[in-house]
C-alpha cells in the first residue's frame, strides 16, 4: 500500500470526476491520501475536511485525511478570525496536520516579512493542537534565502515542540535535507523527482535514510514522467515511488511499506492507516 502524502483533492480540476479519480487511486494501490486544506485562500480551508467526510467509508476508496493552513501567498489575509477558524479545524480528528504553510520567495506574492509573521502565528496554533506541520519552501532561483529564514523560524518556534512535520515537494540540496531530518521532519518527494533534468534532486534522495522519506503527488500539479504536463492525480504516486525505490536500491513493495510506516509514525496512526 502506498500513501500520497500531499494532494489538493479540492481542486476544481477534479470537479467532474473526483469519485472516479479516487477509485483509480485505490485500484493503483494507494491506501490513503492526505488532502491539503488551503483551497484558494483561508475561506476555503475547510474543503479538504469536507471531502474526507464525503468519501471516507465508501468501498474501493483510499482512506482520506486532511490538513488545514494558510498558504504563504495568502498570509496577508490572516487575521484573528482566520486563526480561530484554523484552530477549530485542527481540533477535528480527521485534520492531522497544519499546512501547507511556509515561505515562498520565488513568486511575487506576499511580502517576506508578512509571510514570516503568518508562519509564526500558525506554528503557535499547530503547537497548541499538537499537529505536525506541512512545509512549503521555495527560494529565489540560485538562492537559499527562504530556507535560511525558514530554519531560523523553525529553530525558534518549532524545534522545541518535537512535533516535526513534512518538507513537502522537496527540491533543495543535501544541506537543507539534512537540517530537515535533524529537526524531525520527513522529506517528501513529488513527481519532479522523475524529470530528466532533476538529477541533482535524485542525488539528494539517494542519500536520505529510508526512515526519513515520503512520496506525494502535489496533485493536480507536477505529474511525473511520462505524464508530465497532464493533470496529476493520486494514482500517479506509484511512478514517483518506483523512482525513489530505484534510487535507494530497494523494491517498490519495500518503498511502499517504508513510506507508509513513516507516515503512520509521524501522525501517530495505526499500522493499517489505509483502513
Image (tube, rainbow, N blue to C red):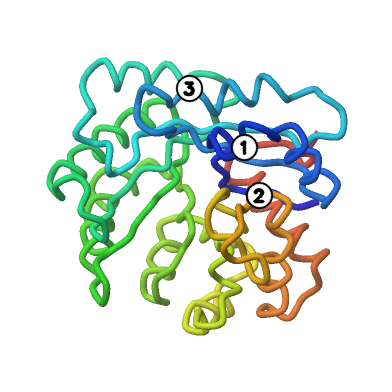
Vertical placement of residue 182 versus 14, above or below: below
Q: Contact (CB < 8 A) between labels 2 and 1?
A: yes
Q: Contact (CB < 8 A) between labels 2 and 3?
A: no
Question: Looking at this view, is 99 or 50 the one in front?
Answer: 50
Mark 1 residue element: helix
Q: Which residue is labeled 1 in the image?
A: 14
Q: Which residue is labeled 2 in the image?
A: 233
State the CA–CA distance, disc 2 to disc 1: 9 Å
State the count of labels: 3
Q: Which quadrant of the figure contains the C terminus?
A: top right
Res. 125 image quadrant: top left
Left or right position of 235 against 132: right
Query: Reading the chain from its start, which is encountered first: label 2 or label 1?
Result: 1
Mark 3 residue element: loop
Question: Looking at this view, is 187 or 218 the one in front?
Answer: 218
Question: Comparing marks 3 and 1, which lies closer to the viewer?
Answer: 1
Res. 65 image quadrant: top right
Whole-percent x and y of residue 50?
A: 58, 20
Is the residue marked by circle 1 packed among few (<14), some (14-19), or many (20+) residues within 10 Å? some
State the CA–CA distance, disc 2 to disc 3: 20 Å
Left or right position of 31 against 214: right
**What residue is at 59 percent from the left and 79 percent from the top?**
206
**What residue is at 50 percent from the left and 79 percent from the top?**
198
Whole-percent x and y of residue 49?
A: 56, 24
Is the residue marked by circle 2 packed among few (<14), some (14-19), or many (20+) residues within 10 Å? many
Res. 191 image quadrant: bottom right
* Residue 212 showing in the rendered view: no
Amino acid at each position: 500500500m502506498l500513501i500520497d502524502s500531499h494532494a489538493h483533492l479540492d481542486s476544481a480540476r477534479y470537479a467532474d470526476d473526483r469519485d472516479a479519480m479516487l477509485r483509480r487511486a485505490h485500484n493503483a494501490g494507494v491506501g490513503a491520501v492526505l488532502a491539503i486544506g488551503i483551497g484558494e485562500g483561508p475561506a476555503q480551508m475547510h474543503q479538504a475536511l469536507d471531502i474526507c467526510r464525503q468519501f471516507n467509508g465508501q468501498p474501493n476508496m483510499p482512506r482520506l485525511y486532511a490538513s488545514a493552513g494558510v498558504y504563504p501567498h495568502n498570509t496577508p489575509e490572516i487575521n484573528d478570525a482566520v486563526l480561530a477558524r484554523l484552530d477549530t479545524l485542527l481540533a477535528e480528528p480527521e485534520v492531522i496536520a497544519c499546512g501547507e504553510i511556509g515561505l515562498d520567495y520565488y513568486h511575487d506574492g506576499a511580502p517576506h516579512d508578512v509571510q514570516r509573521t503568518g508562519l509564526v502565528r500558525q506554528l503557535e496554533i499547530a503547537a497548541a493542537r499538537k499537529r505536525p506541520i506541512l512545509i512549503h519552501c521555495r527560494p529565489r532561483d540560485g538562492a537559499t534565502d527562504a530556507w535560511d529564514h525558514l530554519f531560523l523560524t523553525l529553530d525558534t518556534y518549532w524545534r522545541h515542540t518535537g512535533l516535526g512535520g513534512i518538507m513537502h515537494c522537496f527540491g533543495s540540496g543535501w544541506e537543507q535535507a539534512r537540517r530537515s531530518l535533524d529537526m524531525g521532519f520527513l522529506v517528501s518527494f513529488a513527481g519532479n523527482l522523475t524529470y530528466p533534468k532533476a538529477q541533482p534532486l535524485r542525488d539528494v534522495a539517494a542519500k536520505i535514510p529510508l526512515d526519513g522519506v515520503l512520496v506525494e503527488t502535489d496533485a493536480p500539479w507536477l505529474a511525473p514522467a511520462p505524464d508530465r504536463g497532464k493533470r496529476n492525480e493520486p494514482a500517479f504516486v506509484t511512478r514517483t515511488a518506483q523512482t525513489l525505490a530505484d534510487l535507494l536500491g530497494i523494491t517498490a513493495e519495500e518503498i511502499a511499506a517504508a513510506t507508509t510506516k513513516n507516515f503512520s509514525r509521524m501522525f501517530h496512526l495505526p499500522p493499517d492507516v489505509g483502513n
